[in-house]
Image: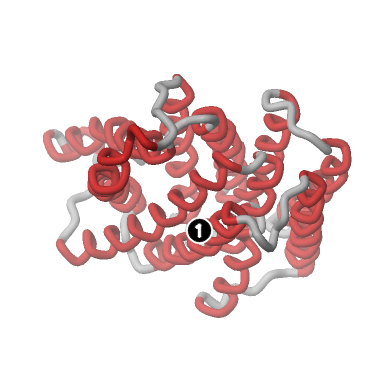
């Protein structure tokens, strides 16, 4: 069940990446990210209110948000800092890079997550899973190499550095999620409250870094896709945390499957954004799908 949820999360994450690229094109990054955190918080508000005002009504459902002590909030605040760091790097990189380059590089995140899962959680993969992981790693590397045809110098481009940093911090977040879930932190408590803490942090960042210089940078333009960033992200994260709540779930596999969202992003780059060198990258994407198939077979 947890693997099926991971695939669903990947589909939603691909839609999220597509909306993010649409919202950020020729737009100011910080206000887009601020609105994203605001909408996420608003979407979770009914659950917080209902859980506090009428807990008996939803206590036995998957939407219940239990109360948390100070220690729990401190752990969640740390997660917010990690995730927001990853988002800031990823948003700036997504604005300035083709999605068919940024998404595949970000898709290499499971490699780091896999190493961390084996080192810190003692996860062991079976033969099918190892085959799937190896195929996926090769595919992600080939996809990244294909990006060089876009004329981007990987060694001297600040936005490539940003997407690499987003990948590293994203892997840290995935490992931290597994730690929280394996130590009894309730998935809904983490999911809901880290959104609120991110909103608070983004308000500070916007007021200090963006608002004073807003007239000297790219102007902000409202687009409908900004709201859908939040909607798809909330749904993707909800399914993701639900998958991790299963005792037998493996963060290395869940993270790898989630990165198959690159298929959705790639398709959007070809059809919606008319990006280049699509044919040469299509073969690499087939390898991604083959790797996902072996991961699925390894959990049956």
Quarter of the picture containing the C terminus is: bottom right
Question: Is there any visible trace of residue 168 in the rendered image?
Answer: yes
Residue 244 x %, y %: 48, 55
Q: Nearer the viewer, residue 61 or 141?
A: 141
Q: Nearer the viewer, residue 191 or 295?
A: 191
Question: Is there any visible trace of residue 255 in the rendered image?
Answer: no
Q: Residue at x 60, y 49 (%)?
A: 258
Q: Residue at x 52, y 34 (%)?
A: 20
Provide the residue designation for mark 1.
170
Q: Nearer the viewer, residue 34 or 286?
A: 34
Task: Give left or right: position of 64 versus 52.
Answer: right
Q: Nearer the viewer, residue 242 or 154?
A: 154
Vertical placement of residue 91 versus 272, above or below: below
Question: Dot 1, how many residues are within 10 Å of its Cα: few (below 14), some (14-19), or many (20+)?
Answer: many
Q: Residue furthest left?
A: 53
- Residue 272, quarter of picture: top right
Residue 107 x %, y %: 65, 53
Vertical placement of residue 170 versus 14, above or below: below
Q: Residue at x 68, y 70 (%)?
A: 125
Q: Residue at x 31, y 40 (%)?
A: 213
Vertical placement of residue 277 versus 88, above or below: above
Residue 130 x %, y %: 75, 67
Task: Give left or right: position of 187 versus 3.
Answer: left
Q: Secondary structure at mark 1?
A: helix
Q: Residue furthest front?
A: 216
Residue 119 x %, y %: 56, 79
- Residue 156, quarter of picture: bottom right
Task: Give left or right: position of 213 versus 97.
Answer: left
């Amino acid at each position: 069940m947890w693997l099926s949820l991971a695939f669903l999360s990947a589909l939603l994450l691909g839609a999220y990446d597509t909306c993010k690229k649409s919202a950020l094109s020729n737009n100011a990054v910080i206000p887009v990210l601020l609105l994203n955190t605001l909408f996420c918080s608003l979407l979770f508000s009914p659950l917080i209110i209902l859980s506090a005002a009428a807990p008996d009504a939803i206590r036995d459902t998957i939407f219940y948000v239990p109360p948390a002590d100070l220690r729990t909030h401190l752990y969640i605040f740390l997660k917010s800092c990690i995730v927001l760091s990853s988002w800031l790097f990823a948003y700036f990189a997504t604005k300035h890079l083709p999605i068919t380059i940024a998404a595949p590089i970000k898709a290499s995140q499971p490699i780091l997550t896999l190493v961390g899962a084996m080192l810190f959680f003692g996860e062991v993969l079976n033969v099918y899973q190892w085959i799937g992981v190896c195929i996926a790693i090769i595919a992600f590397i080939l996809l990244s190499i294909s990006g060089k045809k876009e004329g981007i110098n990987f060694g001297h481009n600040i936005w490539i550095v940003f997407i690499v940093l987003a990948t590293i911090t994203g892997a840290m977040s995935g490992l931290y999620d597994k730690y929280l879930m394996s130590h009894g932190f309730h998935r809904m408590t983490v999911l809901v409250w880290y959104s609120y803490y991110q909103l608070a942090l983004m308000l500070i960042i916007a007021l200090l870094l963006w608002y004073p210089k807003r007239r000297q940078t790219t102007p902000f333009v409202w687009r409908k896709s900004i709201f859908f960033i939040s909607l798809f992200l909330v749904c993707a994260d909800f399914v993701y945390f639900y998958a991790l709540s299963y005792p037998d779930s493996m963060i290395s596999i869940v993270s790898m499957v989630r990165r198959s969202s690159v298929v959705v992003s790639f398709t959007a780059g070809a059809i919606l954004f008319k990006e280049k060198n699509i044919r040469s990258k299509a073969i690499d994407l087939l390898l991604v799908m083959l790797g996902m198939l072996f991961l699925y077979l390894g959990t049956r």
